[in-house]
Every structure is written in C-alpha cells, then in structure tokens.
Amino acid sequence: MSRYDEEELLGRARVAYTRNGGTLLAGQQSEVQEVDGTVYAVLRNINGILAVYQYDPEKDALTGLKEWPAALESN
C-alpha cells in the first residue's frame, strides 16, 4: 500500500502547473514515479515532460523543479 494517493498528487501537480503559468494540457502519460526513494509527480503530454514536482511526505507538499533526475526522462 502506498504512502500517498497517486491521483491526488497528479491533481495537485496539475493545479500548481496551471497556477504557475503552464498552458499546455498534461495528458494520460502523466504519472507518479519514485527514483531513489524520492517521489515525483511528472506531468507529460505527447511531446514529453511539461513539469516535475517533488513530493515531501513530511510536509505533504509538492515543489516544482527546474531540473530532475534523468531517470524520469526515460518513461
């Protein structure tokens, strides 16, 4: 059982993306991924990654990233 709700995190990431000026629609390719124990909400569309948010479970907060692990690019 996961420590977080994936759909909720993606929803929160979509809201943050829009509030920060994102205009492209995140598609079905968006997902929550875990890399080296860190959880990321990855917003994608057919052209690739739109935005990445790192999840902090202690604060129950998402932080937008300008750079992210290369492992997120491969999916």
Image (tube, rainbow, N blue to C red):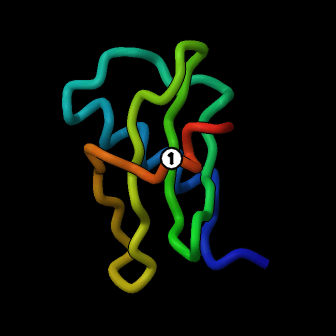
Q: From the top left corner, tell me how far across and down residue 7 is, in percent.
A: 62, 51
Q: Nearer the viewer, residue 41 or 66?
A: 66
Q: Residue at x 29, y 49 (%)?
A: 65
Q: Nearer the viewer, residue 65 or 6?
A: 65
Q: Nearer the viewer, residue 8 or 41?
A: 41
Q: Residue furthest right?
A: 1
Q: From the top left corner, tell me how far across and down residue 27 is, in percent.
A: 59, 23
| Relative horizontal placement of residue 41, taking residue 51 as reference (left or right) | right
**What amino acid type should be assigned to the residue bearing mark 1?**
Ala
35 over 15 or under it: above or below? below
Q: Residue at x 42, y 37 (%)?
A: 14
57 over 9 or under it: above or below? below
Q: Residue furthest left?
A: 20
- The residue tagged with tag 1: helix, strand or loop? helix
Q: Residue furthest bottom?
A: 58
The residue singled out by tag 1 in the image is 70
Q: Residue at x 51, y 71 (%)?
A: 38
Q: From the top left corner, tell me how far across and down residue 30 is, in percent.
A: 60, 36
**Few, some or many residues within 10 Å of mark 1 (<14, 14–19, 20+):** few
Quadrant location of the C terminus in the rendered image = top right
Q: Nearer the viewer, residue 7 or 40?
A: 40
Q: How many marks?
A: 1
Q: Quadrant of residue 56?
A: bottom left
63 over 44 or under it: above or below? below
Q: From the top left corner, tell me how far across and down residue 54 is, in percent.
A: 40, 60
Q: Residue at x 35, y 60 (%)?
A: 62
Quadrant location of the N terminus in the rendered image = bottom right
Q: Residue furthest front?
A: 70
